Image: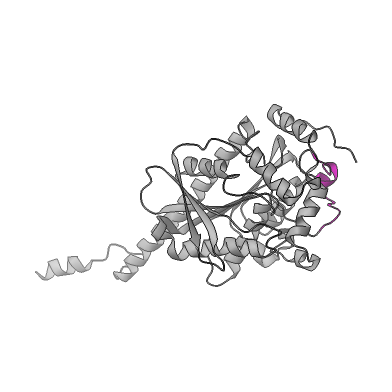
Amino acid sequence: MTTPTVYLDPLSRAFADAAANQPPLESLTVEQFRAEVDLLQQHEPLPGVTRTEFTVPFEDGVTTYIFKPDGYRGDLPVVFVFHGGAWIGGNVDSHDSICRDIALQTGFAVVFPEYTLAPEARYPTQQEQCYAVVKWVKKHGSTKGLSEDLFAIVGDSAGGQLTTAVTILASTRKPTINIAYQVLISPVTDTVTTDRDTPSEYRFFNGPFLTVPFLRKCIDAYIPNPDDRTSELATARNISAKNAAKQPPTLILNSSADLLRDDGVFYGEILQKAGVDVAIMTSHGQLHDSVLFEAVRAGATPRAALRLIAAQLKMALKETGEVKVAAKGRGKRLRDGLSEENTDQPTKKDVRRRKR
């Protein structure tokens, strides 16, 4: 099967042509793939953001990074970023630019768990580590200048699979954790299908860039037991109707020339049918995960996609914060003996004045 001719914008075309002259991804060892990611993602860090490191005490510890815009004040709303890299690669440096962009464009804190990669650790270790970081921030976030109530999650590619898993865990495990919004960028939502039978998987079987044989290899490294792949935590497209209805408002960003395009589309349709507020968008002329890769993310379309991500995150967390403030105000009025219907009742201070 040959790679089809497909329109790509100039930066994406140059990237795809360069990739076509390299050994296919599926031929690389894990170590070679990780080195390739490191090489691709070399960059000068954006100024205006401070990156710090700490360890969340879960099992052997989860190395976690916080990105905060300079000059921040108070406990900032939190955007968790779960990174892609096919579960076998990626790290805080490969995703440094996108984390800084989100922090700068939203004014929020970005929390980045550097989960243990496969095959050193297998499913479900990675999603449990990410969930543990969310739980830690929920309980201890204020010690790091983080909100303990205003949360959103962004995940790209394999990180999209982790995002769908964590939002399910957050809405089903007790006590539940409210996730105000999730952004899925070129997500993997099906780890079961071995012949990759969606239209986009068929058309882009051999790329450009991402290929089905490489994805199969990575799924085998991440979830070696085929029976585990049927869980909704591994394959979001198997989500139950009950749990689908519990998912947060969602933005799904797909790329036109990506074998995973339909993974995102089909999952978005499932959530929409369950009544979730979901925007499904496909960027024309783009490769897989174009907002991430340094070689293409400076293009007009990835830049616009990042602005959209930031705008949606700001709107969602602002609205969630306003609801929480309103709820606190309502609770205070009720504690002061005021009904919701009549807030003109005399306060305790008024009564004392009249007695005088």
- Residue 244 position in % (x across, y down): 66, 62
Which residue does the image show at 67% across and 59% down from the upper left?
274
- Residue 318 position in % (x across, y down): 46, 50
Check if residue 99 falls in the magenta segment.
no
Can you say which quadrant of the picture contains the C terminus? bottom left
Which residue does the image show at 58% across and 55% down from the upper left?
114
Image vertical order of residue 315 relative to residue 325, above or below: above
The foreground one among 150 and 289 is 289
- Residue 309 position in % (x across, y down): 57, 43
Magenta span covers which residues?
A: 193-207
**Residue 191 showing in the rendered view:** no
**Residue 46 showing in the rendered view:** yes
Name the chief secondary structure element in magenta: loop
Which residue does the image show at 38% across and 46% down from the upper left?
72
Which residue does the image show at 49% across and 64% down from the upper left?
136
Q: Toward which corner of the image does residue 22 lie, by quadrant?
A: top right
Can you say which quadrant of the picture contains the N terminus? top right
Image vertical order of residue 356 relative to residue 272, above or below: below
